[in-house]
Image (cartoon, rainbow, N blue to C red):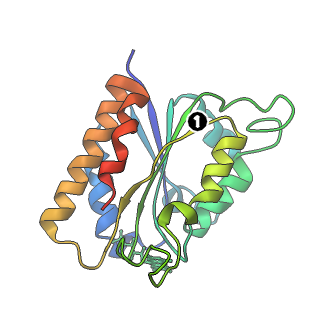
Amino acid sequence: MSKKIVVIFAHHNFTDSRIQRSLLKGISNLQNVEIRDLYKLYPDYFIDAKKEQSALAASDLIVFQHPINWYSSPAILKEWQDIVLEYGYAYGENGTALKGKDFLQVVSTGGGKDVYQPTGNNRFKIEEFLRPFEATAYLCGIAYHKPFVVHQAYRISDQELEERTKDYVSLLKSYIENGNTALATLNTHIF
Ligand SMILES: Cc1cc2nc3c(=O)[nH]c(=O)nc-3n(C[C@H](O)[C@H](O)[C@H](O)COP(=O)(O)O)c2cc1C
């Protein structure tokens, strides 16, 4: 049976977005993919936990898609986690609602892969900055997969961006058809 995906999207300044706009446009017409644009849905930050939880319930794969802002996610995505991933729902006693689902993070960075190294300006690999998300997934019993990263947001050419967008679209399509075996090959998608 086809798998379902929910994309939790956050960009605080979508008007000026190039990378995330392209990625989002690529997946916008895919069947079985629901996109939840948090800044559009909740401009006042009052997140509706029940609505978000029913969107999660209907999905097999949860995607967090966002630019990296100050080595983490945009603020509303942190708020979303605080409000939606409640005790007794996502973790703790009887908190098994998300157990067995898959998780994928789709991020873009200004810095290149070279600066996300122990010897580079950012000192740590991108995977290390994403550890809180990995730990959250683990606590909730969700399978964490390697992130899909588009580096060098300010330098990537239109053609490269088009290719990364195609990679992203193929990945989600493949997940819908084949489930999480599609995510196993993801390390080839980090640029
Ligand atoms: C407030 C803010 C903080 C940012 N912090 C980082 C950062 O910590 N690391 C990084 O590599 N890029 C950082 N950037 C660059 C963004 O990640 C980059 O502009 C974005 O991924 C490009 O996607 P877009 O074209 O969809 O906006 C930051 C940008 C902004 C506006």
Q: Which residue in the rendered view is the most extreme toward the top?
A: 1
Q: Looking at the picture, how far across and down is residue 16, in whole percent? A: 34, 76
Q: Looking at the picture, how far across and down is residue 96, in whole percent? A: 74, 29
Q: Which residue in the rendered view is the most extreme toward the left?
A: 159
Q: Is 96 above or below relative to 145?
A: above
Q: Which residue is rendered at x = 61% and y = 36% of the image?
A: 142
Where, by quadrant of the figure, is residue 85 drawn?
top right
In this view, the residue in front, 19 or 38, is 19
The residue labelled by disc 1 is: 56
Q: Horizontally, is 171 left or right of 8 in the view?
A: left
Dot 1: element: helix
In this view, the residue in front, 178 or 55, is 178
Q: Which residue is rendered at x = 22% and y = 72% of the image?
A: 156
Q: Is 143 above or below relative to 100?
A: below
Would residue 170 be visible to someone looking at this image? Answer: yes
Q: Which residue is rendered at x = 21% and y = 48% of the image?
A: 166
Q: Horizontally, is 145 left or right of 139 in the view?
A: left
Q: Quadrant of ligand 1?
A: bottom left
